[in-house]
Image (cartoon, rainbow, N blue to C red):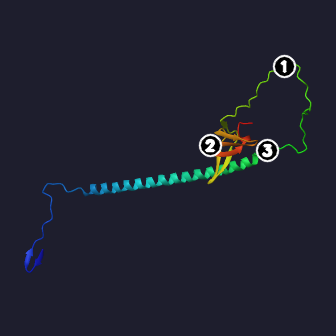
Amino acid sequence: MICYNRIRVNPPSLPTQPKGAKPANIFAQVFFAITAAIIVIGIIVWLKTSYVANEHARTNLQNLIAHADTYLHLWNKHTSRVPTAPADASPSRSVSAKSAPLKSPVAVTSITPPRIPNIITLTKPVSITIPYGIIGLRIGTKVQLLSRTSDKVRVRHDGIDYEIPISATNLR
C-alpha cells in the first residue's frame, strides 16, 4: 500500500488463477528453451567441425599431390637419361657408291610415311612444370599429339600445350 498526501492507493492486484485451475507449467517451458539452445549449439558445432575437417582434408590432399609431383619429377629426371653411341662408332653396314643395275623392270610405288596418330598414350609418368608448381601426368594418360621432333613431342592436355620426351610415349 502506498500513501500519497494521506490518500491511500491500493496497487492493482496481480492476476491470479481462478480457483480450480492448474498452475502454469514453468518447468516444461524452461526445459523446452534449454533443449532448443542445446540443439542450436550442437548444429553450430557440427557445421564448424565438418568445415574444419574438410579444410584439413583438402590441405592434406594438396600436400600429398605436391609431394607426389616432386617425387615424379625427380624420378623422371633420374630415369630420362638417353644412352648415346660413342663418338668413334661406325655404322654396322657399309653402303657401296655404285649399286648393281636391275635385271627386271620393277613397278615404282610411292612410299607414304607412316601415319602419325592424333592421340598418343603415355607409357611413363611425366612431370611438367607450370607457373604455380609441377603437375604429373600418369601412365596411360591420353594426350593429343601436335608435333614431333627427334627426342621430344609437343602434346595438348586439358587445353594446354606441353613438350615431353618421346620416350615417355607409345611413339618410337
Classify 10 Å Cα crowding around label 2: few (below 14), some (14-19), many (20 and above): few
- Assign the N terminus to one quadrant of the image: bottom left
Query: In this view of the protein, which residue sits in the foreground, 39 or 51?
Result: 51
Amino acid at dot 2: His
Q: Nearer the viewer, mark 3 or mark 2?
A: 2
Disc number placed over residue 82 in the picture, else none:
3
Amino acid at dot 3: Val
Q: Which residue is mark 2?
A: 157
Ranked by sequence position, the earlier of labels 2 and 1 is 1
Q: Are marks 2 and 1 in contact (CB under 8 Å)?
A: no
Would residue 70 be found to the left or right of residue 57 on screen? right
Amino acid at dot 1: Pro
Q: Residue at the location (7% across, 77% down)?
A: 7
Q: Residue at the location (90% across, 24% down)?
A: 101
- Seen as rendered, the residue at the extreme top is 104
Q: Residue at the location (89% across, 37% down)?
A: 91
Ranked by sequence position, the earlier of labels 1 and 3 is 3
Instruction: Say which element carries label 3.
Output: loop
